[in-house]
Structure formats: structure tokens, C-alpha cells
Image (cartoon, helix red, strand yellow):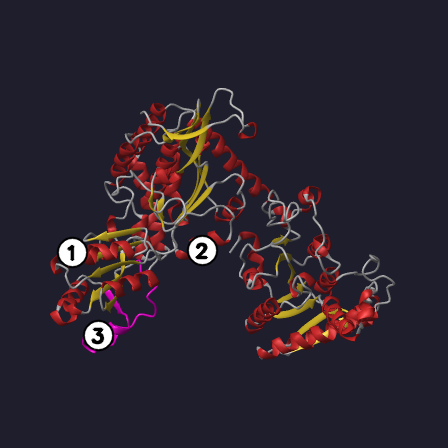
């Protein structure tokens, strides 16, 4: 849950206001899909014990659509040639309100939910008795689990120009919902718009940024509002005024997109959706947001200074880091031991404790891998392709750093060392956020590594984020941070992907398979299977599903393999075919899409290699998959058709690792099909740029240019 949204756990009464641009389509007809999703969310909230009140626009638009149709049906051809007078808004409201409420009633009825219509006008609120009666009626309806649906009664409004007049207590449904939020003592007001929230400028402008938390002192002078919505009379300006009014009076408000099918539920789960208005906002994240930006900008500036060094100077930095780690090994191990003890006392699972602990010899191993990295070929500024564009015009495609990386990782403090060394080698700035369970380990490792950085680069090249609450602010900085790499659980990766516009590189799951073909050498299969599962059960490249050719059932091979797994303490769960065999006594798995991260795996029988491939492509996570087979044709088919980042023949899935691949280290393993895939080492942290060298050539409409496009040799 985002730190600024913690208050939602205490919300009971919530008002949801939905705008005309959400409930209607671009052609003016009702947006049935969005309305259905809205009603389903309100039903879910109702079931969960929330008191839900709906304020809806759309009556005028719905009525206008119906009256235009009636006028068309009742008009002669001659009538249609005359200038068409705009339909009266009050008539549209009267016709549309009836249809709008009938639609809500039908949708709620399908969900076994009862709704009630309450129409109000501006003048009604001038009467204290009316306000008291309104509150009493709404309270009774909510006690009965009924959803009150409120709207301004435009059909009988006494204002002369209800679409222009800005006098009175309220003059659109945004202001009405804010007024109701205070009058009915709501805990939260959600204003659903046709955009994701409040932007710093028009949402159509690529330079505009979504504002996650509104700070009046800062944003009211910085925001440029775009055009009002195509429908309704509110718009974002009205929403901001209404939200600011309600929030100042003590009711939090969130402006979010009503076009997303689950945003209301997300808001009440505390996810960072839309723009938050809160009376305490000025006490929260303004300093944190500024601090996050300063940290990212400092990392970028330091990375540019790092890139300006010679290759030998960058190599020396890595060697100095390796020496510093070994020199401070005792202190590092002491801090890590304190983390492990604290995690044990907190009752963390053994799989996390395994990832957290730095085993004896680990620091030396890390230092060795850094020295290997230092001796690798210089990655920055490499000429990847050289082309003569025209006579005397030479184009070079070269390698260069991505810029600033944000790495969020869980549990493993050794990941900090690997990532930091790769960032230095690739010339990138780095921001690191480790798990709270490794707080002391990460702090000492960060201190040791940054102390080895030369002053002309600066220790801000590698920033350590210590508070989880800082992550949402960093994820907003798509103009400063170039890539996010999450290393951790499926939940962590999914949350980050949903919370940022910054490109995210990584994998959500490590569901790796070993398929044992009927042609397999069983002794080899046993070794590979046990290593893939037990060498490090918590690793993302550990085997989670074990597939066996059906012929091994008759030959007794399946019994042997299962016996070996059980003798090593592996808990087994069967697919439909295996669990149906009573003699094996293997309980059925609930899903094939399961990453155990422990000594446990799923076992299933398949008809042949094609069935194995189909199973893996359907249920796997495109991480690492292995075939054990002596039949080379079977192996070739498997390796060509399994759509994973790494595919092995007769080798443990545990080999899928940056260090084992000779990359020196890795920032993680990517199952993405864009940019880097598989273990991500230095190469995966680089991008390219084009260098064009000429002698005064100009295009001038290509009249004087003779293009040759000739490949040139790259000279080391």
C-alpha cells in the first residue's frame, strides 16, 4: 500500500461521482461496458461492507441522444433541410434522467443490488430541513444496503442558464459530490474522469506529468488546464476546485479514470491510482518527492562524469571496490549476521533466510567476480557498425550507457554488490532499494562500495533508497530514471509495472521445467532433476515443474525419479494424470502456474515432446526450461519451439545465471522480448547512439548527395 494512501484502510462511507464523458461514448450513446464495470465495482464494495453513494452525470447527454432520434423520426424531408435548433437542456434532462436511472436499476438488478434515485437542486440546499431529511434518508438506505444514486435535477432547476451560471451553492455534479461528501460525512470522495487524474498540463501534451498527490501551494500555480471535456459542464478545473474544497474541509478526494474497469477497487486497496487531495498532503511527500528527484539527478550527473573517465580509470574503480569488500569482510559479515538473527526472530520463512545470509566465502567470491568484470572488454563507446553513407560521410553505431537505473530487490544483499559493479562497468547511475530484512547488510555494502568511488565521480553515483515510501515518488520520475529492474516476487514486479511509465525489465515468475524424454539417460535425468530443484530451491531458475514422457511409466522410470525426489525431501504435487494414479499417492496441484521457491514441485505425464512444448508454452513463465534426451531430433524440436529466454539440453536450469554465462554478474533475468532477454549483464545495461562524421555535407533536398551505404570494416 502506498504510504500516502494508508488512510483508505479506515474508509467506510465512500461517494463515487461519475462524469458524463465516462458514462457516455464519443457518439453520445451510453457506454454500457463502463457502466457495467462501475456497477460491478460498487457491488463488490457493498459486499465488503462499504457504504456506497453514487453521484452520476449523463442525464442531459442521454436525453439529447433520444430526443434527436425522435425529432429525426418525426421530421419531414423539408424539415430536415431547415437549420436545426438546439434541443432544450431541461427537456433533455427530463427525458434522459428517466432512461439513465432505468439503466442503473437494470444493471444493479442483475447484480442483486438495489438502488434508489435522489434528485436535488441548488435551491434545495438552502433549506436546513431539506439537508437534515436528505441525510436521514441516505442513512436509512445505506442501512438497508441500498445504493443511493444522486443527480442534480436539471429539468426543474430555477437557474436561467444552468450550463453557464456559476452562482449558488453548486453548479455541476463535481461541486454537488463535494457538498454531499461533507453533508453526509463521507470518508472518501472518488471523482471519476475520462483521464487518469490531474496532469501538470493538458493530458494530450507528452510533456505533461500525472500528479499523484496535489500540493495546493505548489501545483495551483504550475498547472496548465487543457480544454474541458466534450460533454457535461464540469471539466478538470471544476474537479480540482471541488476536490480542493472537500479535502480542505477534511474529506480526502481522489480523481481517477472511470474508463479503467477496476480503479475504484484499486483506490480502496491503497494503490497509487489517480491524483490524491488530502488536507495533510503538505506534510507528506513534497520533500520526499524533491529528495527522490535530487537523488536521481545526482546519479545522472555522476554517471556522466564516470563516462568521461578513461577505460583504465573505470577498470581501477572496479578493482578498488573488490579490494574494499575484502578489506571490510568482517564488518560486512557482522552486519549481515545481525540481519539474519532479526529475520529469524521475526519469523521469516527459511527460503528468505537462505537468500538473506551471506555464506562464508561469499565476499571473496563477489570480489573475484568484480575483478573478472574489470578485465572484460571495455563496453562503452564500442563501434558496433560502421557505414559510409556517402563520399566522406561516415556513420558509426556505438554503445553507450542507458543513464540511470532503479533496481528494487528483495532479501539478497549480494545482489547489491553485483548490480553496483555492473552499473559502474556500464557507466550508469544507480538507485538501489533493498528489502527491509537486509537493511543493515545493504547499508554497510553501500558504504563500502561508495567509499571506493573517486571524488571526481562522486559517491552519489550509487544512491541507496532506505524507505519503502520513497519508491512511488521515484517511479514518477520517467524524465530522470531510464529503466526499472525489479528482482523479487511476482507481486513486487506486478505492482511496479502498474505504477510507472518508466520501462520495466525483469520477470514476474520463475516457473522452470525439466522434461525427461523417453530417450533420456535416466541417471543423467536424476542428476539434472535433483540439481535443478535442490541446488538452490528459492532461486528463480530452480525447477518448479517436472514433465515425464508417458513411456517411462511402463518402464518404471517415473517411479525411480519420484522416489529420488521424495528421498531428498521434495514435496510433490501432481497434474491431472499423475494425481489420478492412486499408487503414486501424489496430491493434485491447484495450478500449473506455481513457483514454490522451496523443496517442492509439480509432476505431470505428457505424451511426447510436442505435448511437453505445448505445456511449457502454456503454463511456463518463459524463464528457463530443459529437455533431457538422447534423441537429438527431440532435443532440436524442443530447443527451437520452447518460447523461453533460456532453453537447455541435458543441463540443469540452474546454469541460467549471469556469472555462469560469463557475464561477470547480472542485475537480474529478463523474460521480456524487448531489449535484454535472459541474464542481464553489462550488455543489457547499454543502448546505442549514432555518430555521424562529415566534412560540411548538407542534404539540400538530396540533390547533391550520392548515397553509397557501404559497410566499412571496424578497426579495433
Residue 447 located left or right of residue 231: left
Q: CA distance from mark 2 to mark 1?
A: 34 Å
Query: Which quadrant of the rendered structure holds the C terminus?
Result: top left
Distance of label 2 from label 3 (alpha carbons): 35 Å
Q: Earlier in the sequence, mark 2 or mark 1?
A: 2
CB contact under 8 Å: marks 2 and 1: no
Residue bearing the label numbered 3: 585
Give the residue drawn at x 37%, y 55%.
346
Question: Over which residues does the magenta segment extend?
Answer: 571-597
| Cα distance between the residues tagged 1 and 3 | 23 Å
- Residue bearing the label numbered 1: 527
Q: Are marks 1 and 3 in contact (CB under 8 Å)?
A: no
Task: Kindly state the secondary structure of the residue where label 1 is placed.
Answer: helix
Residue that badge 2 annotates? 494
**Quadrant position of residue 145:** bottom right
Q: Earlier in the sequence, mark 2 or mark 3?
A: 2
Picture layout, residue 592 above or below residue 351: below
Residue 311 magenta-highlighted = no
Q: Considering only vertical position in the picture, is 75 above or below 337?
A: below
Q: Nearer the viewer, residue 288 or 686?
A: 686
Q: Nearer the viewer, mark 2 or mark 3?
A: 2
Percent across and percent down for residue 260 are 57, 61
Secondary structure under tag 2 reads helix
Question: Tag 3's secondary structure?
Answer: loop
Q: Position of residue 690 (x, y in %)?
A: 45, 31
Amino acid at each position: 500500500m502506498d504510504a500516502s494512501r494508508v488512510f483508505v484502510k479506515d474508509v467506510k462511507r465512500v461517494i463515487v461521482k461519475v462524469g458524463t464523458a465516462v458514462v457516455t461514448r464519443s457518439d453520445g450513446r451510453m457506454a454500457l461496458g463502463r457502466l457495467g464495470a462501475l456497477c460491478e465495482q460498487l457491488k463488490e464494495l457493498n459486499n465488503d461492507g462499504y457504504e456506497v453513494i453514487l453521484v452520476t452525470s449523463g442525464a442531459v447527454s442521454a436525453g439529447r441522444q433520444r430526443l434527436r432520434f425522435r425529432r429525426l423520426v418525426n421530421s419531414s424531408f423539408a424539415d430536415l433541410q431547415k437549420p436545426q435548433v438546439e434541443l432544450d437542456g431541461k427537456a433533455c434532462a427530463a427525458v434522459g434522467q428517466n432512461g439513465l436511472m432505468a439503466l442503473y436499476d437494470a444493471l444493479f438488478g442483475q447484480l442483486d443490488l438495489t438502488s434508489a434515485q435522489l434528485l436535488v437542486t441548488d435551491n434545495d440546499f438552502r433549506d436546513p430541513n431539506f439537508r437534515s431529511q436528505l441525510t436521514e434518508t441516505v442513512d436509512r438506505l445505506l442501512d438497508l444496503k441500498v445504493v443511493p444514486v444522486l443527480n442534480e435535477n436539471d429539468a426543474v432547476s430555477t437557474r436561467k442558464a444552468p450550463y453557464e451560471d456559476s452562482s449558488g451553492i453548486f453548479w455541476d455534479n463535481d461541486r454537488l459530490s463535494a457538498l454531499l461528501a461533507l453533508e453526509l460525512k463521507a470518508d472518501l470522495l472518488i471523482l471519476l474522469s475520462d483521464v487518469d487524474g490531474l496532469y501538470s498540463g493538458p493530458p494530450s501534451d507528452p510533456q505533461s506529468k500525472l500528479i499523484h498527490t496535489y500540493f495546493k501551494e505548489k501545483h495551483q500555480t504550475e498547472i496548465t488546464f487543457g480544454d474541458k471535456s466534450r460533454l457535461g459542464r464540469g471539466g478538470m478545473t471544476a474537479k480540482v476546485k471541488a476536490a480542493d474544497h472537500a479535502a480542505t474541509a477534511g474529506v480526502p478526494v481522489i480523481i481517477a479514470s472511470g474508463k479503467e474497469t477496476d480503479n475504484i477497487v484499486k483506490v480502496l486497496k491503497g494503490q497509487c491510482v489517480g491524483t490524491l487531495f488530502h488536507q495533510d498532503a503538505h506534510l507528506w511527500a513534497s520533500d520526499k518527492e524533491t529528495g527522490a528527484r535530487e537523488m536521481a539527478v545526482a546519479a545522472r550527473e555522476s554517471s556522466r562524469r564516470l563516462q568521461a573517465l578513461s577505460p583504465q580509470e573505470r577498470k581501477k574503480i572496479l578493482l578498488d571496490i573488490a579490494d574494499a569488500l575484502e578489506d571490510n569482510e568482517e564488518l560486512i559479515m557482522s552486519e549481515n549476521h545481525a540481519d539474519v538473527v532479526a529475520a529469524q526472530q521475526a519469523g521469516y520463512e527459511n527460503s528468505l533466510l537462505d537468500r538473506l545470509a551471506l555464506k562464508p566465502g561469499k565476499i571473496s567470491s563477489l570480489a573475484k567476480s568484480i575483478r573478472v568484470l574489470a578485465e572484460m572488454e571495455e563496453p562503452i563507446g564500442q563501434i558496433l557498425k560502421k557505414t559510409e553513407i556517402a563520399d566522406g560521410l561516415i556513420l558509426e553505431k556505438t554503445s553507450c550507457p542507458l543513464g540511470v537505473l532503479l533496481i528494487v530487490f528483495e532479501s539478497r544483499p549480494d545482489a547489491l554488490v553485483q548490480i553496483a559493479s555492473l552499473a559502474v562497468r556500464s557507466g550508469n547511475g544507480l538507485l538501489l532499494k533493498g528489502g527491509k530484512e537486509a537493511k543493515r547488510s545493504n547499508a554497510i555494502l553501500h558504504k563500502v562500495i561508495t567509499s571506493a568511488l573517486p571524488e571526481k565521480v562522486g559517491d552519489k553515483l550509487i544512491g541507496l533508497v532506505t524507505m519503502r515510501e520513497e519508491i512511488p515518488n521515484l517511479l514518477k520520475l520517467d524524465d530522470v530514471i531510464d529503466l526499472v529492474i525489479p528482482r523479487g516476487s511476482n507481486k513486487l514486479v506486478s505492482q511496479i509495472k502498474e505504477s510507472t511509465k518508466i520501462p520495466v525489465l525483469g520477470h514476474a515468475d520463475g516457473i522452470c521445467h525439466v522434461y525427461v524424454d523417453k530417450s533420456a539417460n535416466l541417471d543423467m535425468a536424476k542428476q539434472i532433476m535433483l540439481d535443478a530443484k535442490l541446488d538452490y530451491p528459492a532461486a528463480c531458475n530452480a525447477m518448479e515443474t517436472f514433465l515425464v514422457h508417458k513411456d517411462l511409466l511402463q518402464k518404471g522410470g517415473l517411479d525411480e525419479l519420484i522416489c529420488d525426489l521424495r528421498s531428498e525431501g521434495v514435496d510433490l504435487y501432481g497434474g491431472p494424470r499423475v494425481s489420478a494414479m492412486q499408487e503414486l499417492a501424489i496430491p493434485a496441484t491447484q495450478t500449473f502456474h506455481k513457483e514454490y521457491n522451496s523443496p517442492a514441485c509439480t509432476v505431470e505425464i505428457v505424451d511426447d515432446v510436442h505435448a511437453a512444448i505445448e505445456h511449457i508454452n502454456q503454463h511456463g513463465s518463459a524463464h528457463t526450461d530443459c529437455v533431457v534426451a538422447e534423441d537429438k531430433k527431440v532435443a532440436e524440436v524442443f530447443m527451437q519451439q520452447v518460447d523461453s529466454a533460456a532453453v537447455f539440453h541435458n543441463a540443469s536450469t540452474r546454469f541460467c545465471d549471469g556469472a555462469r554465462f560469463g557475464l561477470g554478474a547480472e542485475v537480474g533475468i529478463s523474460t521480456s522480448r524487448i531489449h535484454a532477454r535472459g541474464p542481464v549483464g553489462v550488455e543489457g545495461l547499454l543502448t546505442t547512439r549514432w555518430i555521424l562524421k562529415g566534412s560540411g555535407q548538407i542534404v539540400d533536398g538530396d540533390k547533391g548527395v550520392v548515397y553509397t551505404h557501404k559497410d566499412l570494416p571496424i578497426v579495433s
